[in-house]
Amino acid sequence: MTRTYQAKLDLPASAALPDEWDMASTGITPPDDFVVSRYADGKVASRFADLYWNWTPYDPDGRASWLVFNYWQKTTSRIERPMREPMSALRSDIVREMQRFMALLIYKKRGASLSFRSLTELSSALRLMAQYSEKQEIRFGDLWQSSARLEDFCASLETKHVLTRVSRLMATLMAMNPETDIGFPLGCAELFATLQKRVSAFPANRQTPPMPTRVYSSVLSALNSELNDFDAVSDRYLALVRRIAALRAIPRGGRESLYDLTAMIAEHGLTEYFREKGTSATVHGVSSGLSDIQVVCRLTIQAYTGMRHSEAQTLPYHCLATEKRPGTRHYFLSGRTTKFENGRIRRTRWVTSTEGARAVSVAQRVASVIYDVVENIPVESDDRISRYPLFVATSYLEFSGKPTYQAVRQDAYQTSDNRLSSPPYARLLKRLRPIVLDEDIRELEEIDPHRSWGEDPEYAVGQAWALRSHQFRRSLALYAQRSGLVSLPSLRRQLQHITKEMSLYYSKGSVFARNFIEDDPADYNEHICKDWRDAKPVSEAMAFLRDVVFADEPLFGAAGIFEQQKKNRGQIVDREVTVKQFKKGLTAYRETPFGGCVKVGECDKTGLRMMGVLCLHDCKNIVIKLSKLNRAIDQQQHLVESLEPSSITYHIERDDLDSMLQARKRCLEIANKDSDHG
């Protein structure tokens, strides 16, 4: 029986495999010179005995990636550097056992292969156990063999996140042979069930909430304002960046001082911009300002595409494509999904609007300066779309020293790690987040009445909205439906274009969705189009509850009168049952100029006349609100008055106006009759 094993990893197609592990000759511990990672050309990246395993060759995007075993440090280093002091015998033993366990995970894991993310999560669990071992002054193997020690270690774990990782690590190792693979029996067999119960006892992860419409509109407006502000000074700002980069290339004795850039910033007419943004007049401040605008561009792209953070973060420089069609221009962003199949990146496209395309353009201008400084030109390639990222790291400018990841070989440029929660973006976040009001909480309660919004400290009235990048995805999928759910006029205007585009391409039967997404179920489940379609019945149900069931004014029209009669009888509507009916396709609702329509399926009337006045005559699905009908009548009267009475257009629009007036007359007669009976 063979005992030679290959690494079970999700690797890029062109990657070179690490060494095969011949356990028959090496035993349960690989030799120190065992190659654990290789570059595509076969050169060694890391060996088993290295304190840092260089995983950059196996990262699908070519990012600098490491598996680290320096568990005694709070932060993990990105490059291998000499130890400041020799390790103790105990620490050396613990590190070697951690490395052996990592090799077991890579080579001997049962089932599916591992991604780098999975490896890092399991590595973090090993680090915690190593810290415990050193603190208790016991060997790593002794900890794993002792049920009492493992129970004491697990008792110190408090969060669901950590418990889940430790539980997964134990499950993976328990599936191996304790004699031929691990070398000793594990002491976690009985503990494992208890650990799983503790994990299950934690509350389920709550769904990311959408932003209330007022908050959503405010955040989108703030992002647009940030882009406008930078657009106005971008040429001068980027000229300043080029000047600083050129000065840094001059030997220190022959260049201007770069400690205080106040005069230089004034020369470029940027004093007021730096003051408004709270940016310091230093080299670090200039670099920080570029990072801020990259975050703004990335969030704007997410807002108008529905991408996840990682999908937007890894967009290639040449991602924007346009398609011209009669009377309009369509924008697409090409990138990769977050799922891989045997290390192969799955490519896809997202529909976006002019706002999303503009954000890409601004990000490209920033990236171009960085690539110019490093004397490289982003080349578009079908083979490696991730080599030149759109959000290339500003650290390549070396305004704050040479970044550590430049000390190793790379096949692709690194991206900026610009998460909103990072401390450097505190000032930007303050400008983007509106203060939560009572009306926002009431709207959240309409969306999810079973969640205690008033008791959630993250969404307390009077504090800044807890902005998360994933909220853009859910908000877009939920609100940008043609269901009347978006109530603010400003938000309607901002989402109008993207709504049309996404409705066109992501609706049922879309050729785009079928060809690019649904042929691969895994990709379909990760793409915004699935969220878009899943959110449609929910958003329709919410609009129906708001505009019909809980409407403050009387309802008219065949469907409106039917719903009004149920309310008059005091009939209680169950929200969950209503949502289920919409999801099953038994009920439907969409907003119309006169109120709403509850027809399931396609309408055969609205397409014949612009205003859909045919619905006003004898449609059984129409819900009429006098407030909306009156507004439509006022607008139609102004239109009719502006037309030439002898024109054909005048007669058509006049007929529409007459239909509206007759419908209002019928509604008023019904209202008066009801008041007489009352």
Image (cartoon, helix red, strand yellow):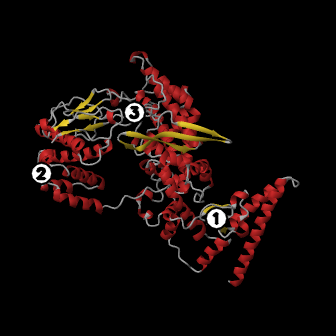
Tell me if residue 554 can be seen. no
Earlier along the polypeptide chain: callout 2 or callout 3? 2
Dot 3: element: loop
On-image quarter of the C terminus = bottom right
Q: Nearer the viewer, mark 1 or mark 2?
A: 2
Give the residue at x 18% y 30%. Answer: 33
Q: Nearer the viewer, mark 2 or mark 3?
A: 2
The alpha-carbon separation of the residues under discs 3 and 1 comes to 50 Å
Q: Which corner quadrant of the image does residue 311 belong to?
A: top left
Residue 126, image x, y percentages:
22, 45
The alpha-carbon separation of the residues under discs 2 and 3 comes to 43 Å
Q: Nearer the viewer, residue 515 or 542?
A: 515
The disc at residue 185 is: 2
Category of crowding for the residue at label 3, using alpha-carbon neighbours closer than 10 angstroms: few (below 14), some (14–19), many (at least 20): many
Earlier along the polypeptide chain: callout 3 or callout 1? 3
Most extreme residue toward the right, as rendered?
A: 646
Most extreme residue toward the front, as rendered?
A: 1
The disc at residue 596 is: 1
* Residue 503 higher or lower than 370, as above or below: below
Dot 2: element: loop
Q: Amino acid at mark 2?
A: Pro
Q: Nearer the viewer, residue 221 or 609?
A: 609
On-image quarter of the N terminus = top left
Earlier along the polypeptide chain: callout 1 or callout 2? 2
Category of crowding for the residue at label 1, using alpha-carbon neighbours closer than 10 angstroms: few (below 14), some (14–19), many (at least 20): many
Q: Nearer the viewer, residue 272 or 18?
A: 18
* Residue 170 higher or lower than 1, as above or below: below
533 sits left or right of 67 in the view? right
Q: Amino acid at mark 1?
A: Gly
